[in-house]
Image: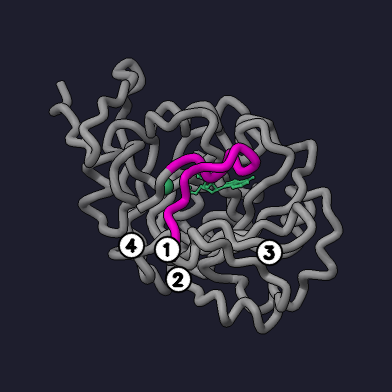
């Protein structure tokens, strides 16, 4: 039996115990990832299995974005509410077209500045992406990570990888190997270990799907730097820290606390 989980806010989470499995561990160099190891992990992604992998922000819990059953496993493994959408990770700009339906041309200066890197952009969703990934929203969150292991895993999988942070819902996002093991051992098919993550902070999120660009979540990138390429970027008061965000029914993706 697993030990009861200590959640920050004393909430209980329901974990499905029937799904326990043997987890394969792969140790991979963070700068020079071994292709043979990552091919094994990529094969699991293609088969609809879950793979935990490092990114420059936090460790992610990844699944094939197009595989609805694999996406359901992500929510189950984390105990994540299904109305909290996932971020899709890509490894090149061609993959972006498989995920979004919007013309992204006018945002190329922004994408050149922040990608690959710790910034998530929200666009109109492509119909190939299951609604479960976006929690029923018409928009989709996308990130092109800079971490060599993340990039190589996505490239070898050949599909965009949907991944929330690799923690149990309600616990802090994992930045260290031991945190990932504690939360995800026996819940996923494979865990790739590559040492601590670089930023240790979740990605900055910018919504580009609703007219005026808007910062939805502060992160490693300074909003002033973003304004250099997005002069009309709206930085809501709750993001700049002057006021607490109390929930807005127009932004269902922001319902959950991140820190
Ligand atoms: P994470 O918890 O780091 O995996 O990030 C997921 C978060 O990204 C969600 O909790 C939302 O805040 C945000 N998000 C993902 N998709 C969308 C979307 N389509 N619209 C708005 N926010 C989104
Ligand atoms: Mg998270």
Q: Nearer the viewer, residue 191 or 204?
A: 204
On screen, 75 above or below 225?
above
Who's the residue at 67% across and 54% down the image? 122
- First in sequence, mark 2 or 1: give its number: 1
Please tell me how many numbered marks the rendered image carries. 4
Residue holding disc 2: 220
Q: Is residue 225 visible?
A: yes
The Cα–Cα distance between marks 3 and 1, rounded to whole angstroms, is 18 Å
Predominant SS along the magenta part: loop
Residue holding disc 1: 57
Q: Nearer the viewer, residue 134 or 187?
A: 134
Who's the residue at 50% across and 40% down the image? 255
- What secondary structure is marked by label 1? loop
The Cα–Cα distance between marks 2 and 1, rounded to whole angstroms, is 8 Å
Who's the residue at 57% across and 25% down the image? 69
Residue holding disc 3: 92
Q: Is residue 30 magenta?
A: no
Label 4–label 3 contact, CB within 8 A:
no
Q: Position of residue 11 (x, y in %)?
A: 26, 29
- First in sequence, mark 3 or 1: give its number: 1
Residue holding disc 4: 194
Q: Is residue 37 visible?
A: no
């Amino acid at each position: 039996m697993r030990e009861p989980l200590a959640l920050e806010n004393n909430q209980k989470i329901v974990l499905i115990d029937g799904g326990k499995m043997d987890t394969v561990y792969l140790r991979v160099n963070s700068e020079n990832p071994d292709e043979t190891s990552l091919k094994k992990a990529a094969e699991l992604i293609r088969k609809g299995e879950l793979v935990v992998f490092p990114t420059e922000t936090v460790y992610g819990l990844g699944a094939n974005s197009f595989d609805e059953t694999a996406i359901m496993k992500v929510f189950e493994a984390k105990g994540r509410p299904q109305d909290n959408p996932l971020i899709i990770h890509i490894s090149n700009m061609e993959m972006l077209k498989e995920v979004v339906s919007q013309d992204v041309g006018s945002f190329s200066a922004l994408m050149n500045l922040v990608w690959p890197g710790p910034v998530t952009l929200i666009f109109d969703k492509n119909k190939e992406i299951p609604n479960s990934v976006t929690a029923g929203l018409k928009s989709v969150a996308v990130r092109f990570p800079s971490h060599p292991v993340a990039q190589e895993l996505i490239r070898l999988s050949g599909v965009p990888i949907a991944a929330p942070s690799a923690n149990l819902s309600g616990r802090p996002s994992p930045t260290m190997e031991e945190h990932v093991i504690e939360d995800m051992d026996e819940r996923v098919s494979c865990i790739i270990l590559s040492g601590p993550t670089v930023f240790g902070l979740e990605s900055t999120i910018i919504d580009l799907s609703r007219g005026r660009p808007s910062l939805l979540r502060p992160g490693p990138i300074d909003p002033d730097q973003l304004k250099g390429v997005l002069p009309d970027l709206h930085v809501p008061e709750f993001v700049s820290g002057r006021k607490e965000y109390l929930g807005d029914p127009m932004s269902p993706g922001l319902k959950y606390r991140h820190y």
